[in-house]
Amino acid sequence: MSEPSIFTRILNGEIPSEIVAQTENAFAIRDIHPQAPVHLLVIPKTQQYRDVVELAAGDPALLTELIGLANTLAAEHADGDFRLVFNRGANAGQTVFHVHAHVLAGGLEERHL
Ligand code: 5GP
């Protein structure tokens, strides 16, 4: 059994962070270092999958659940439009190896990537 990830510890209430939404198998928090006016993280409750490639192979329904939660949050916290970013691997900037989607919204019209 691996050590609990930082997100598991947040889910368990061991590290303070407001859980802004949750579904049966996923939850969302605000990123501690926001990169956009709205920057949320959508995270499976299980830390079984390290990144989006593992998640897609292992539980595509859970990946779909994450995208649905991201869509709901973008409607609640912005105008419904959003960017969804999964970093996969340290060389792409991944720092927490418990798969999570970055939901970025608000004021992104000038950005193309
Ligand atoms: P990654 O770089 O792995 O794609 O994304 C990890 C994200 O988690 C980063 O954007 C980072 O700011 C965020 N993060 C790391 N530790 C914490 C924390 O303790 N609380 C919150 N809310 N976000 C965190």
Image (spheres, rainbow, N blue to C red):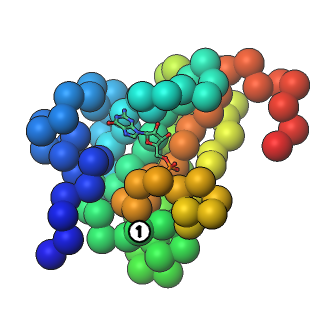
- Image quadrant in which you'd find residue 20: top left
Q: Is mark 1 on a helix, strand or loop?
A: loop
- Provide residue 13's location: percent of width, then percent of height: 13, 37
Query: Quarter holding the C terminus?
Result: top right
Give the residue pinned by disc 1.
50
Q: Is residue 65 left or right of residue 88?
A: left
Q: Residue furthest front?
A: 91
Between 101 and 93, the one nearer to me in the picture: 93
Q: In this view, does 35 lie to the left or right of 51?
A: right
Tell me the residue at 27%/26% (across/down): 18
Tell me the residue at 56%/66% (across/down): 89
Between 94 and 66, the one nearer to me in the picture: 94
- Provide residue 75's location: percent of width, then percent of height: 56, 26
Amino acid type at mark 1: Arg
Between 64 and 52, the one nearer to me in the picture: 52
Q: In this view, does 101 lie above or below 49?
A: above
Q: Is residue 30 left or right of residue 81?
A: left
